[in-house]
Structures are given as structure tokens and as C-alpha cells.
Amino acid sequence: MANVSNAPEERTTNYKSRRIFGRTVLYFGATLFAMFAALPFAWMVLTAFKTDNDLYNPNNNPFIYNDPPTWDNIAFLWNETTYPTFVLNTLIVALAVVVITVLAVVPAAYALTRLAGRWGESLGILIFLVYLVPPTLLFIPLTGVVADLGLQNSKWSMVLVYPTFTIPFCTWLLMGFFRGVPWEIEEQAMIDGYSRIGAIWRTVIPVSLPGILTVVIFAFTLTLHEFVYALAFVQSSGEKTVSVGVFTELIRGDVYFWQSLMAAAALIAFPVALLYNYFLDRFIAGFTLGAVKG
Amino acid sequence: MSSPPVTEASVSGVSEGRFWFERERVLGPLFLLPAVVYIVALVGFPLVLAVLYAFSGVTVGNPRIDEFVGLDNFRSVWTDRVFQKALQNTIVFTVISQVIVLILANLLANILSAEFRGKRLVRFLVLLPWTTPVALGVLGWFWLLDSVYSPIDWTLRFFGLLGPDTALGPARNMYYLGTTELAQFSVILVHIWRTLPLATVILLAGLTAIPQDIRDAADIDGAGFWRQLIYIRLPLLLPIMAVATLFATVFAFTDLTIALVLTRGGPVNDTQVLASWAYFRGIQGGNLAHGAAIALFLLPVLIAIAIAMLRLARRSGADEGS
């Protein structure tokens, strides 16, 4: 009798301890992965506010502020280096790339989902695969093309070339949005007397604004991510963008301005990460190639 | 649905549009034109140009690409010992990092598919290596692995593992980027760090798409964690794992940024990969023909990956139809 009544109780305690064990493993794993991923960024932020005295003493505990934190490095970065120019160039290039991308991608995605019928999807996948043609394969001939067009050493070379990866990626992304558009509204607008272009402008575009916003964000962040073309095309510091400028200009020969360097990296990295993170689900939906439905 | 059924006639009547260019047969190509022209002119044409470069004597100083030199470039590139090292490194770095990424991504995706406190923060942090510009993140690693001020060295010294009369001594620093094995290890580590989030989020999408009723049925039938993993999750996840691996492989295989920012191919070309060697020969050395020839060695693998990807996409498309 006692045995019978004991059994379920034993099972629940067993279940409980297993659950606690499972939760512990879960939190431990999550913490470990988060620390590994965030390590260089944590180190960046910590470094950015250190004084020279503190930083360049190998005996100091590097994980704490031995001297009080200082804003001097960020002031130096902003006032004494070409960093503001890099930021400005980055914004100009990114904005121009966004405009070109949206102008090319919205009609293309519309044509592929709405007009091309059965082969639209296949053509869409082909265009997406263009995104995977790596800059490594193209930067050498493109350096020649850029030089032929007289754009070497100019930020406009990046404006010209960056849409080669934003257009394929964003076309695919926007096709996903367009598939969900209820086309009856467009037809209704045409029955009401609007031309096709007018109907698209009045119905499809407003309904797809979230999709177009996603395109804007990704064209922007992918531009900020780019490094290879920028490195190959541009040598004069006045035309450089952040990811290359920081790397080439704030390291002068053997002299590293480590705190300013890290501040420069962190100041761009975190805003970009926040933007990207917010729109990430759309990014994944594009990357799973329809292998996942949901 | 209260709207009246749309008949074939009314659809085609509407689709004709008001102006001649609004007919579907005209409007479709017209809308596609800007995107297609861009891709053909600045991806298709440069790809052809890369091949032409590789068979010519073109340099920065001599931009003539019409001198056909046959396989000369490939021959002289191939016999270079640095090239062979770079080819080997490219394959070894990619294979090792991607095997580890596949294992870790499965773990991490399972963690992120569970509910726990602070999950949003963990997700944000875990994705940082992918969401931030790669050159800037790698710059952080570069400083983290500094030859004198690395905090890892400080920690090792603190615990008495590094320095005179210790297990890792007598030097006071490990020189992570200065010795062959450690530099190669560091490059692989940063590759894992960079591509893990991408593989993870793709897997996570697959994991959350496993229908709940399948899980419930397995629970009711008494299938334990391992059984569910081996008989249900893994087979269902296989296609998406393939997608994750293929994408992550493309990025690791063709990477130039990590190679350039972290080690610049050093010490003494020991971490040189095809992409970085193409950069040093083609852009810095000014020999565009050699650079193009080196980069073209990436092409066979990329084509294989593209074909695999198309087959995966077609298969999932067929599933949808059935």
C-alpha cells in the first residue's frame, strides 16, 4: 500500500529535479554562447573609455577601470581624425544605394510575383543566387570597370557597385511580401478606372510599405557591412567609408589609437546591430529559400 | 468572401491595362529591366571579365586584356608555394569551422527555441557577430588577441599559467596572431564566431516550423528527448540544415575580410587564403591577371553549392505542390 502511494510522488520529485537540471543547462548554455558572441564588443566598449596610462600597462587588471573612465578618446576621434568624414561618406553612399535599390527592386519583385506566372518563382531564385556570387570573385574585374568609368578613389564607385548585392537580396525579400498582397484590391482599382500603374501606386504600394521599409533597412545595413569593394576601390581618406576608414586610417604604421579605434567601431556596430536585429525575421524568411513554411 | 467570383474574362480584360505598355507581356519585362540590366552589367559582365583577365597579361599598368596567354597565369599561380598554402588553408579553415558551426548551431538553435527569462537579450547578443559589420567585429578580435595587451594573456598570467616558470611560459604572452598554429586557430575561431549566428537563425526557423501536433504525438507516445531528436527532429530538419550549412559555407569559403583584418595572411603567409592571396597579388601587387586566376579557383565549389541550393529549393517547391 505504502509503495503504491509513494510511486507518483517519487516520479514528481524525479521530474522536478530533472527539470531543474534542464533549466540549469539551458541558462548555462545561453550565457556561454552570449558571452562568446559578445566578447569582442564588450572588449571594445571597455577599451574605448580607458586612459593611456591604464590601457598600456600590462600589469593592470584589464577588466576594470584602474583610472576613472574618460571621454577624451571619443572627443579625439570626433575632433582630430577623419572619422566624421567617414561617417558622412557612409551615410551618403548608403542613402544613394537605398534609392537605387528601391527603384530597381519594387518593379522587379512586382513583375516576378504578379506578371511572370510560373517561371517568376524560378527566376526569383536565380536572382537571389546572384547575391551569393562573392565580392572575392568580382572585386578584381570590377576594379578595372571602376577605373574605366573614372570612378576610382571616389565614393561613387561604391554607389555604383553596391546595388549588385542589395538588388538580388532585396528582390527576393520583397517577393515574399508581394505574395501576400490580396490582388483583388488592385483589380478593383482598375475596374474603378485607374490605369495599371495608378492602381499599383494606390493599392499595392501602400499595402506593401512594411516590405519596402524592410528593403530600405537591408539595403542600408548591407551597405554598412561591406568591406571588400570599399578596400579595393578607394585609397584616399576623404572618400572612405567607416568600415574601411577605421581600419586603414586609425592605424598609422605601427601606431594604433586603440581606444579611439574601438570607439569608432562600437559607435557604428551597435546601431547597425539594433536595426538589423529588429528586421531579422524577414531576413531569415528570405534565406530559408521556402524550405520552411511558417 | 463576399466579393463576386472573378471570371477569366474579367481578369484578362483588366490586365490589358489602359496604355500599350501596361499589357502584361510588355509591363513584365519593362519592370524587370532595371534590375536585370544592373545584374548583367555589374555581375555577369565582370564574371566574364574575370575569366578574360585570367587568360591575359593584364596588370594595373597595362590594361590590355586582348593578349591571350593561355594557361600561363594558372600555371605560374599554381606553382607558387604560397598559393598552394592558401588553397589548403581555404579548404581546411572552411571544413573545420563549418563542422563545428553545424554542431554548435544545433545546440544554440535548441536553446533559443526554448522559453526562458532574458531570451531577447541573449538572442540580440548571440546575433551580434552577424548583425554588425564584419570588419568592425573582427577589429575587436584583433585587439582582443593583441600580442602584448591581450586580456586572455593577463588572465592566464593571473592564474599562473603563463609567464616565467609556468606551464605555458616562459614568455609572458601567447602571440595568438604571431605563431603559425595559434594564428590558424584564431582565424578558424573567428570564422566560427562569424557564421554561427547565420546557421543558427536558419535552423531556428526550421525548428519552430515543426508542427506542434507532431511533438505532442511523440510526447504522448512516450518518446524521450533523444528518441525525438533522432527520429523526429533531425530527419525533419535535414533540408534546413543543408540550407544553413550551404549559406554559412559560402561566407566562410569566400571570406576576405577576416583574413585581411585579423592576420593579413601572416605570419609569413601561414593564414593566407585564396581570397586574401588574390587581393595581395591582384590589387596590392597590381597583377590583375594573376589575382583573377587565383580567385577563379573558388568558382567550382561555388557552382556546386549553387546547384545543391537549386535542387533543395526545387524539392521544397515540389513538396508545396503536393
Image: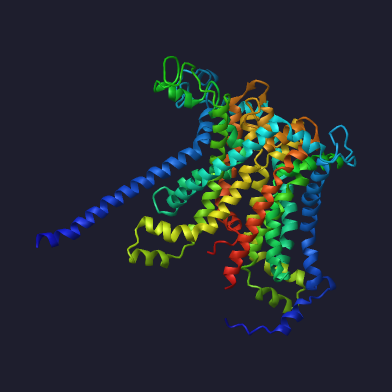
Instruction: From the top left corner, tell me how far across and down residue B170 is, in percent.
Output: 47, 16
Instruction: From the top left corner, tell me how far across and down residue A247 is, in percent.
Output: 66, 31
Q: Residue at x 62, y 23 (%)?
A: A256
Is residue A200 shown left or right of residue B219?
right
Q: Quadrant of residue B306?
A: bottom right
Instruction: From the top left corner, tell me how far across and down residue A97 is, in percent.
Output: 73, 48
Q: Dividing the image into 4 quarters, which one contains the N terminus of chain A?
A: bottom left
Q: Is residue A53 above or below residue A27?
A: above
Q: Quadrant of residue A263?
A: top right
Q: Nearer the viewer, residue A205 or B136?
A: B136
Instruction: From the top left corner, tell me how far across and down residue A184 is, in percent.
Output: 66, 76
Q: Nearer the viewer, residue B125 or B242?
A: B242
Q: Residue at x 59, y 25 (%)?
A: A258
Q: Name the colour scheme.
A: rainbow
Is residue A73 shown left or right of residue B83?
left
Q: Nearer the viewer, residue A149 or B170?
A: B170
Q: Nearer the viewer, residue A266 or A169?
A: A169
The answer, for residue B275, to whether it is visible in the render is yes
